[in-house]
Each structure stands twice: as structure tokens, then as C-alpha cells.
Image (cartoon, helix red, strand yellow):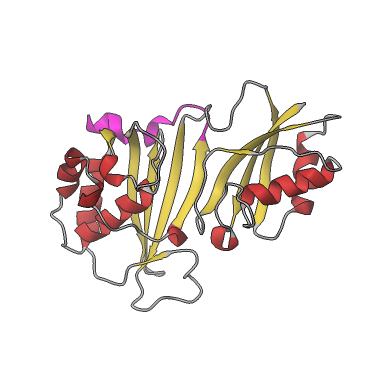
Amino acid sequence: MTRYKMTMAYDGHLFHGFQIQPKQRTVQGEIEKALQKMTKGQRVVVHGSGRTDAGVHAKGQVIHFDYPGKQIPAKNMMLALNSLMPRDILFFESEIVDENFHVQYSTKGKWYRYVVDQHHFTDPFKRFYTGHYPYPVDIEKIKLAAQDLLGEHDFTSFAASGGQIIDKVRTIYYVNVTTRPEEKEIVFDFIGNGFLYNMVRIMVGALLEIGNNKRPVHDLQRVIRAKNRQQVRTTAPASGLYLYHVFYDEVPEKYRLDKKKH
């Protein structure tokens, strides 16, 4: 067996999420189908760094799998898989790794990006790739409020029901909010040691409410202390979410704003 670590991008619009499911089109399913062709019928199990939901995209999803038989050079493996992929999946990095590497358990951090379109009406060319929030917002209030998410907290209030994880404590290293005025877009970046089910989408929903004066600027401090999902009932749409990057070395210091805050 040879273990391959591969980095990929995909358009999540036509996928029912990453994880394989019966009678559904999934990212894992498409990759395993291609590998089965390469192995002449032998199943190769693909492991992902995270299970993105239906409609969620990836710019930097990472997978690993153990390939049986003769070792294929990493670059050739990438070329072979890309030739078998549908047009909404692309591999752009490939390497052979030690058998102790695990794409999920070896992570040091993850970077998620969320993009919000603020046009009054839904742009037909953006509807599958952004969230839509047509209401006025105060960006400076959002930026200030976002700093309250930095550091280690129990994020129970930001975890959707249906998650399997009991321990809800996570550390957010970096939060950044920028605008693209020409596109009428707001871009949220979050880097942390891990994220709960729908956590990023719920945080974005709360921040947009603060920007729209539906919540006080520092309301997230109260919400975090409450440890109650009912405190934030808005979840931003899946369409605006991107798994942007997965860190396997320590998160760089330039992204460790949590240390500067505490």
C-alpha cells in the first residue's frame, strides 16, 4: 500500500456533500469510483480532512487514501485522477506520505471563507457561490464584533443540532472581515483549530445581524457564555461557504490574532 495525500478544489453546488451516501452524488463517491477503475474493481477508501455539507465548496480540501499494488509517482497519480474526475473537481497537489499521516487527525488548523452578496436581488450568476444578504450593514460594527470570537471558547451556541461531537470547545486564531465594493460582497475569513457542525455559517449569521443593528455590537460575548443554540437561530446558506485551506504545520504567527488579544 502507498498512502497519498492530495489537495483538491470542488464546486459543491451539484454535490450532496463530501461524505459518501447511498444513491447520492458526493465528492468522496466520485473519487472512490475513479480509484476503483484504476484498481480494476478494488475499493480504495478515501478519507477527507472535513465533511463539507451539500452545496459547500472547497478551495483546499485535503484527502488521503492507501493505494494497492505498484507505487505510482505522486504527480502521475494526480494526472490520472484528474483525467477521471467530473468537471466540478480538480486536484492540484499530490504527495506520497508516511503511513502514520492521517488527513483528519494530523491537522493543526482549518481556514474557512464565507462570501456574502449584498445586491438587492439575488444575482443569478452568484446564487450558488455566495450567501445573499440584501440589508444594510455597518461593516465596522461587524469587524469589532468578530474580535469577540477570538480565543478558546465553548461554542455550543454556534453548533447546529445533528453534530456528533460532545466537546464544543474550540480555539479561533484569526477572524478577518473585508469588503469587495465593486462586487458588493463581504468576505469573512475564520481560522481555528477546528469547527463544529455549521459553526461558521451560524457565526456569519450572527455577525450580519449585528451589522444590521439587530444585536448589540458585543452580543456574541453573551451568546458564548449562554451555551445555548437558541441564542443564534440564523444559519447563513451553504452556498457561500468554502473550505479554503487546511494546515498540517502549525498555523503561522501572522494568523494568530488570538495571542495578541489575550
- Residue at image x 52%, y 28%? 105
Q: Is 220 on the left or on the right of 128, as rendered?
A: left
Q: Is residue 233 magenta?
A: no
Q: Residue 99 location, x and y as percent?
A: 67, 22
Determine whether 158 is above or below 55 in the image. above
Q: Residue 47 location, x and y as percent?
A: 61, 37
Can I make out residue 138 in this image? Answer: no
Number of numbered discs on residues: 0
Q: Please tell me in which quadrant of the rendered image residue 71 appears.
A: top right
Can I make out residue 172 in this image? Answer: yes
- Residue at image x 85%, y 30%? 69
- For the N terminus, the image quarter is top right
Q: Residue 14 location, x and y as percent?
A: 59, 63
- For the C terminus, the image quarter is top left
- Residue at image x 23%, y 65%? 137
Q: 188 or 26: nearer the eye?
A: 26
**Range of residues picked out in magenta:** 247-262
Q: Please tell me in which quadrant of the rendered image residue 237 appears.
A: bottom left
Q: Is 209 on the left or on the right of 98, as rendered?
A: left
Outermost residue toward the bottom in this view: 121
Outermost residue toward the left in this view: 216
- Residue at image x 80%, y 33%? 73
Q: Is residue 255 magenta?
A: yes
Q: 253 or 41: nearer the eye?
A: 41
Determine whether 62 is above or below 9 in the image. above
Q: Residue 146 location, x and y as percent?
A: 26, 47
